[in-house]
Image: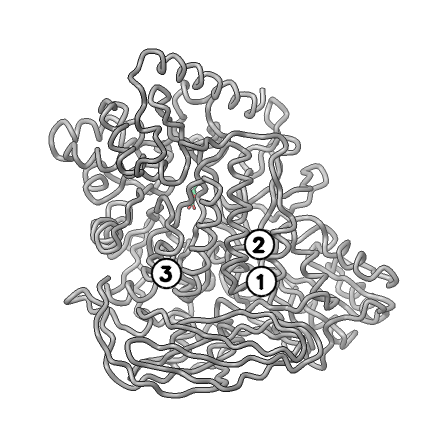
């Protein structure tokens, strides 16, 4: 029997139970949608037993057990499991549905089970999303993901990855929003709002400073409070303000020596105290280490309890409450947070029900990829390609299969995926006794359609030929006999492991050099999780960064290659010239037994580190080329209480194009920070006036003694840039100074 049938039986059973309860139980005043979410939660809580409260604060792995170390989910819930990340039983007698939790940021991660047809849209990676610099595109993607979730019966998406890119080798960098707190917070907040617009709760994760995969469950991320508040925590703060995520997922690592999921400072003081966060804190899978410390430290729900060393929030929590070590009011608060958030996000009034077939959104994914692809180099305007090209060589990177995706819990089995056609690279597919196929979590999966097909469709008159690039000589011969060679190179990243360095793996650098020697008309297409180094850069005229571009990626790329649209992505991370430029030239991999990373760079993450150390990167944060040209004129900035700026932007070229106008402020004695931006599309000759107001916390430093943001009085340099290092105009304004409460 497949899981949808089971889900329907379960829903039927719930409905019957609900009907029976409705006959016996008092009317349910909390179903009055005109009341506030808090009032509704209070009303339903007044009817709950303590055992029912305890039920809501403990979750289970949502798929049938696949690994011996995961403790099995109790038998009574097995038929109800959604077949993916998590499940928290509901209370049918009170009309409270179960929480059905799915990963994550690039679509419905359906890789625990595979049934024929159970595929979903693969959206572009989180870093691609950030590279759009376009909150509307992020919202649209989120709304698409939210719809696909509810069409499969999920009501919680474990989305909202926002760990700052302090470590470009981080195996999950592709899931996150880059190195800048304002950009990451704005984009993640918009995506979360999009998801929740479909009455599906989104998390934000992994709170906090889970900035590398190496030793992620052992490591302590050490950083001073002010630096954390000005960087990683600020990204969360902005995303929470803009997106109102229903839940925050605390991370695996320790923060300043205390596990994040029992960290009073992170959870009680900052999140629930300073930020007045009304939602609930759920743990990452296997990130709980205690009952009392976690409950009193601010954790509200133990996720997938079978992943933890022991169950912490079931009977142990009941005993701790009975002993008065965890106060009943604290248990009540945990449950209140969960229920009020379910009411606030429409989970109870608008139940997520599986539909057949569930929605897919290749068009939304494509539009997002189109905005996220970054043109890094275009010497001699080799791009865009003419559709009349006679012969095109497409080389390498399995570009006859699809666009590469990242591995781990966020992996989506994309629409068009067929395990029997092996659109993936790696170990065996596990075939279950019922015929279902299980994908191992960390695999290279290629999202169809293939770039080869998309390029062929775009240039029907051209002879488009493919070489896999394994045989470099054959590929070079093909390139030499073609008008243009498009070479696909890749860096595969996955949850659970960092990459050892920023070089393209295998012989890919050599492949590019060989093709460049055979044909100077070479276009390099990068499909990478994050930044890579490019020893061949001066040998090639054109480079495009497509990140992990998803189900719409190949079409988006082809449209950009042939100039149907302007490339408008801008880098959300600095590309270093070499690893020697990083705060940690080597990945933090201390000796076993004492795991730590000291983030001594403080809040100087990414471009701020490069600026304060006078380092010239390969490509700066914010960088990206267009097919047209722009003039920025009449730049003016005003000071006083905050910085505001105005500029006229004119498209001086002959094609439609996008400009991303970036405003940076340099407070006295400090380095420049991005304080706002505007992405606009202009027709040839068109002029638009752009107004930008600074995010005031970016003018400030956090004072950890007094607990305020302190804006010093003085002259601030305000500059208009097209990347962190490309200053187009600058001026000084006088700022009054003052404080902002956190
Ligand atoms: C990941 C989370 C994910 C969870 C559930 C964990 O390993 O860190 O991001 O949501 O698994 O799959």
The answer to which of marks 3 and 2 sits earlier in the sequence is 2
Q: Is label 3 in a helix, a strand or a loop? A: helix
Lateral position of residue 682 relative to residue 618, left or right? right
- Viewer-side residue, 453 vs 97: 97
Lateral position of residue 647 relative to residue 356, left or right? left
Q: Which residue was labeled with disc 2?
A: 124
The answer to which of marks 1 and 3 sits earlier in the sequence is 3
Q: Is label 2 in a helix, a strand or a loop? A: loop
Lateral position of residue 504 relative to residue 45, left or right? right
- Local crowd at mark 2 within 10 Å, few (<14), some, or many (≥20)? many
Quarter-of-image position of residue 475: bottom right
The answer to which of marks 2 and 1 sits earlier in the sequence is 2
What's the residue at 83%, 71% (across, down)?
A: 483
Q: Which residue was labeled with disc 1?
A: 372
Circles 2 and 1: CB distance less than 8 Å? Answer: yes
Q: Give the Cα distance between marks 3 and 2.
A: 21 Å
- Local crowd at mark 3 within 10 Å, few (<14), some, or many (≥20)? many
Lateral position of residue 287 relative to residue 702, left or right? right
- Counting from the top left corner in percent of width and height, residue 314 is at 27, 28
- Local crowd at mark 1 within 10 Å, few (<14), some, or many (≥20)? many
- Counting from the top left corner in percent of width and height, residue 60 is at 39, 30
């Amino acid at each position: 029997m497949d899981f949808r049938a089971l889900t329907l039986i379960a829903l039927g059973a719930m409905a019957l139970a609900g009907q029976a309860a409705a006959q016996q139980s008092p009317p349910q005043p909390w179903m009055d949608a005109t009341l506030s979410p808090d009032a509704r939660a209070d009303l339903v809580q007044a009817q709950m037993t303590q055992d029912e409260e305890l039920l809501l604060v403990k979750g289970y792995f949502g798929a049938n057990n696949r690994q011996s170390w995961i403790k099995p989910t109790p038998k009574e819930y097995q038929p109800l499991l959604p077949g993916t990340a998590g499940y928290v039983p509901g209370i049918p007698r009170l009309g409270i549905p179960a929480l059905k939790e799915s990963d994550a940021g690039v679509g419905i991660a359906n890789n625990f089970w595979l049934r024929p047809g159970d595929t979903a849209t693969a959206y572009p990676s989180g870093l691609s999303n950030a590279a759009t610099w376009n909150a509307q595109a992020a919202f649209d993607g989120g709304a698409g993901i939210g719809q696909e979730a509810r069409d499969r019966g999920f009501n919680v998406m474990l989305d909202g990855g926002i760990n700052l890119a302090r470590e470009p080798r981080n195996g999950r960098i592709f899931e996150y929003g880059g190195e800048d707190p304002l950009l990451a917070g704005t984009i993640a907040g918009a995506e979360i709002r999009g998801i929740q617009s479909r009455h599906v709760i989104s998390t934000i994760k992994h709170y906090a400073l889970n900035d590398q995969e190496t030793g992620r469950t052992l490591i302590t991320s050490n950083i001073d409070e002010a630096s954390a508040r000005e960087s990683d925590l600020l990204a969360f703060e902005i995303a929470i303000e803009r997106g109102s995520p229903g839940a925050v997922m605390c991370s695996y690592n320790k923060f300043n020596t205390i596990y994040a999921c029992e960290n009073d400072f992170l959870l009680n003081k900052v999140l629930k105290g300073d930020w007045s966060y009304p939602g609930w804190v759920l743990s990452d899978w296997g990130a709980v280490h205690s009952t009392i410390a976690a409950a009193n430290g601010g954790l509200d729900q133990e996720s997938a309890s079978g992943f933890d060393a022991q169950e912490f929030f079931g009977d142990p929590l009941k005993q701790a409450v009975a002993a008065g070590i965890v106060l009943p009011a604290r248990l009540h608060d945990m449950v209140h947070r969960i229920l009020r958030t379910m009411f606030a996000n429409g989970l109870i009034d608008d139940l997520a029900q599986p539909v057949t077939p569930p929605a897919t959104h290749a068009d939304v994914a494509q539009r997002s990829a189109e905005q996220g692809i970054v043109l890094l180099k275009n010497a001699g305007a080799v791009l865009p390609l003419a559709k009349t090209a006679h012969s095109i060589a497409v080389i390498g990177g399995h570009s006859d299969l699809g666009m590469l995706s990242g591995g781990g819990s966020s992996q989506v089995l994309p629409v068009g995926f067929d395990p029997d056609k092996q659109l993936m690279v790696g170990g065996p597919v596990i075939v279950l006794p019922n015929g279902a196929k299980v994908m191992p979590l960390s695999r290279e999966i290629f999202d169809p359609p293939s770039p080869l097909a998309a390029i062929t469709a775009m240039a029907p008159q051209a002879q488009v030929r493919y070489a896999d690039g394994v045989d470099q000589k054959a590929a070079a011969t093909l390139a030499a006999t073609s008008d243009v060679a498009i070479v696909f190179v890749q860096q595969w990243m996955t949850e659970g492991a960092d990459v050892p360095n920023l070089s393209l793996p295998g012989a890919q650098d050599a492949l590019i050099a060989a093709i460049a020697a055979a044909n100077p008309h070479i276009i390099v297409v990068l499909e990478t999780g994050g930044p890579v180094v490019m020893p061949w850069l001066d040998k090639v005229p054109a480079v495009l960064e497509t990140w992990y571009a998803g189900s719409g990626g190949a079409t988006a790329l082809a449209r950009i290659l042939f100039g149907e649209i302007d490339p408008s992505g801008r880098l959300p991370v600095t590309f270093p010239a070499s690893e020697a430029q990083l705060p940690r030239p080597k990945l933090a991999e201390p000796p076993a037994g004492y795991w730590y990373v000291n983030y001594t760079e403080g809040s100087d993450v990414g471009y701020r580190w490069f600026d304060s150390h006078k380092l010239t990167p390969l490509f700066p944060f914010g960088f990206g080329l267009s097919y047209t040209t722009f003039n920025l004129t009449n730049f003016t900035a005003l000071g006083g209480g905050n910085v505001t700026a105005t500029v006229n932007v004119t498209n001086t070229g002959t094609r439609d194009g996008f400009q991303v106008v970036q405003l940076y402020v340099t407070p006295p004695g400090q380095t420049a920070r991005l304080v706002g931006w505007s992405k606009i599309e202009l027709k040839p000759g068109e002029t638009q006036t752009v107004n930008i107001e600074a995010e005031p916390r970016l003018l400030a430093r956090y004072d950890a003694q007094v607990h305020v943001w302190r804006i010093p009085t003085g002259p601030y340099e305000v500059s208009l840039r097209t990347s962190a290092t490309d200053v187009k105009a600058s001026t000084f304004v006088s700022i009054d100074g003052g404080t902002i409460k956190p």
